[in-house]
Image (spheres, helix red, strand yellow):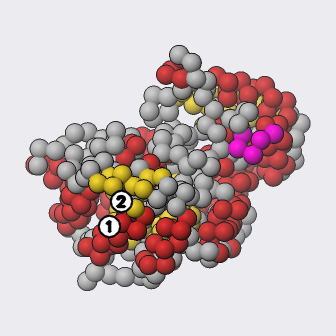
Amino acid sequence: MARIVSVKGRRVWDSRARPTVEAEIALDDGAVGRAIAPAGASMGSGEAVDLRDGGASQGGMDVTRAVAAVSGPLAGALRGMEAADQAAIDGAIRACDGTTRFANLGGNAAIAVSMAALHAACASARVPLDEYLAAGGPVRIPVPEIQIFGGGAHAGRRVDIQDFLVVCPSARNFGEALDRTADVYHAARKLLKDAGKLQGVADEGGFWPVFATNDEALEMLVRAIEAAGYTPGDEVHIALDIAASDFGRGGRYKLGLENRELDSDGLSEMLLGWLGRYPILSIEDPLAEDDIEGFKRFTAAAGDRVQIVGDDLLVTDAGRVATAARERHVNCALIKPNQIGTVTGTKAALDAAQAGGIAAIVSARSGETEDISIAPFAVGWNAGQFKVGSIARGERTAKWNEMLRIEERLGSRAPYAGWGAFPVKERSAR
Ligand code: PGA
Ligand code: ZN
């Protein structure tokens, strides 16, 4: 059993040229673990606090206080603790901060330290992280949701909808899902180029949208799937992240691109219309985080045929996930470790989804790094689905590539989750 001898904070950089927090933890047996906090741009109001310095440095986005919290108070709290006791470590991180959402030390400091301790314990145990987390339980390789167009807060609000993604539950394995996605990505690039609309990529590596309406983006995505040689709604499905909290509050939704304002039912009607016209399998945050009644009505209307995902609504909070599952606000929970601030809290939210009979997606953030922790989380905790942005840019491919390595190592011990990962029945457009 190895104990923590040192905890060090380090200021490193993320994929948006913003500073972020790395934690490095060494144990008395020589094992070392390291992890980096990601950062969101379209954040739920209930998330753990992403502590920034404010002031002039780095546009107020510097993290010297959060880094100092790692090397200072958090190091003091954890030194001497048993590294394998993740619950005790996360309890100590919480107690050291003293607030429910890590307002003092920063959720970014907390998640980096919590994950670094996990990596150190795992290094000490000398097993791969996914197998360490699974502890002999059943595991599957998750179905990836991969972005083709980026929008919303990740593309200067150029279109209202944040993510236009593809998902391939009918692929034989993870590698084949990536192959199909790359084909669609390149077909989309060619369609954009031919239309004189190719303008580079948004924050998560999907193409920067230059569409006149949100419908135009959906039509272009369907055409890209066809141009890549696949049947939309069969070999390749569409997933959307509406991220409606970014343009709606108090039951009013302002669609900037189409210069329209809708109420909760009006937005639902628009989305239900899309579900009828396009091969959409999954829709995230269709309504704003303060519109629980809207979520309930939307899930009652469409939850039998489409996956409805709560992100800003649930913020990886086990209590919120349990309530949402029981009262059918959604039928799937998005799981982002830095929303709740600890590994234990993240696992609890995933457990609440699984206990409540709803699906789960382990997800990256729009501000990412080479840290790949969420890939083994998705496998070891048997989440079933995995969302990391697009299939371009190194901070994204680091995670996809790690999943390919895990798939290769586990072989038949970890089947591709496929349709079984979704809260709706298998369907085909053929
Ligand atoms: P964020 O967005 O990481 O910018 O918060 C991702 C998402 O909404 O899923
Ligand atoms: Zn989201």
Residue 131 in the image: above or below residue 324 = above
163 relative to 60 in the view: left or right: left
169 sits to left or right of 131 = left
The residue nearer to you, when weighing 25 against 164, is: 164
Q: Residue at x 81, y 29 (%)?
A: 73
Q: Quadrant of the C terminus?
A: bottom left
Residue picked out by circle 2: 262
Q: What secondary structure is marked by label 1?
A: helix
Secondary structure predominantly adopted by residues drawn in magenta: loop
Q: Is residue 362 visible?
A: no
Q: Please give the range of residues in magenta.
A: 98-102
Q: Magenta stretch: residue 277 in it?
A: no
Q: Position of residue 368 (x, y in %)?
A: 50, 40
Mark 1 vs 2, N-terminal side: 2
> Is there a contact, CB below 8 Å, between mark 1 and mark 2?
yes
Mark carried by residue 270: 1
Q: Residue at x 71, y 54 (%)?
A: 345
